[in-house]
Amino acid sequence: MGELVRLQKYIADCGLMSRRAAEEEIRRGKVTVGGTTAHLGDKVELDGSGNALVEVRLRGQPVERQTKKHVTIMLYKPRGYVTTMSDEKGRPCVADLVEDVGVRVYPCGRLDYDSEGLLILTNDGELCNILTHPSHKIPKIYHVKIGKAVTPEQLAALNKPMEIDGERYRAAKAEVITLKKNETVLRITLYEGKNRQIRKMCESLGLPVLTLKRVAIGNLELGNLKPGKWRKLSPAQIAYLKGSKG
C-alpha cells in the first residue's frame, strides 16, 4: 500500500495553492476524487512518484505533482490588488503581477485590498504551510499610518491581547516611529495573521488607519523592491523560513 496523505496536503504539494486554500475549495465542493465530490478529512494514496493513484480534480482540472523545482518569491503587493489568483468581481489580483515567474506560484497568507507590502508566493506546499500555520511564530512587521496622534493609553492597549466582536487577538508589539499633532506612524509586529487584524484593532480604539504596509516577514525585508515587482528568495532565505517551525 502506498503512502496515505490528506487531500488538502496533496493539493498543496502539487503546487496549486496553500493547504488552507485547498481546504476551502474542498468545503465548496470544488474537488473530486475518482469522480466523486471530496470532503474534508479525505485521504489519497500516492504512487512512487508522489501522484494520487485515483484521479483528483480541482474545478475540473487534473491535480498532479509538479516536476519542476520549487520557486519562492517575494512580491511588493500594491494597494488595489486582491491576494488571490483570480477574482470573481474582476478586480486586479496578485496573479497578474507574477505571470512572468515561469511557474505557477500562489500566495502564502494575505494582504487585504487596501494594504500593500511584502507578500511571499511559492509552489512549495511545505514552506507555505510553515508561513500560514499558527503554530509557526514568524513575526510580520507593518508600518501603519494613523490619522491622529496616538495617546499613550491607546498605544498600551495595542500591546495587550484584545477581544473584538467575540474574536480574540494575541498581544501585538506596537511602537511609535513618528508622532505629530494629526498623524502617527506605528511599527506593529504580529505573530498571527487573522483577517484585517491591525485595522480591526486600531478601529476598536478609534484610530483611523490611513495606510498599512508590511515591511518584513521575520528577517526578510521589503527593502528597495518597487510596488508590483518581485524577486526570488535566496536558498539562505528559504532555509531561514523553513527553520522557523514552532
Image: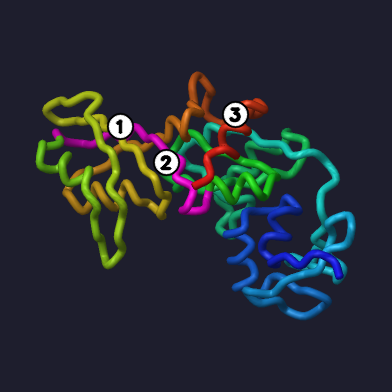
- Taking the spot 25% from the left edge, 60% from the top edge, the residue there is 164
Question: Does the residue at mark 3 contact the one at mark 2 (Cβ under 8 Å)?
Answer: no
Q: Residue 25, position in %: x, y?
A: 63, 67
Distance between the Cα atoms at labels 1 and 2? 15 Å
Res. 168 image quadrant: bottom left
Residue count near mark 3 (Cα–Cα under 10 Å), binned few <14, some 14–19, many ≥20: some
Q: Residue 179, position in %: x, y?
A: 17, 26
Q: Residue 71, position in %: x, y?
A: 71, 36
Looking at the image, is mark 3 or mark 2 earlier in the sequence? Answer: 2
Which numbered disc, 1 or 2, marks the residue closer to the eye? 1
**Range covered by the magenta-colored residues:** 132-149
In the image, which disc is placed on residue 187? 1
Question: Does the residue at mark 3 contact the one at mark 1 (Cβ under 8 Å)?
Answer: no
* Residue type beneath disc 2: Ser
Q: Which secondary structure lies at badge 1?
A: strand
Residue count near mark 1 (Cα–Cα under 10 Å), binned few <14, some 14–19, many ≥20: some
Q: Quadrant of the N terminus?
A: bottom right
Residue at mark 2: 115
Q: With 45 as the anchor, is 165 left or right in this view?
A: left
* Residue type beneath disc 1: Arg
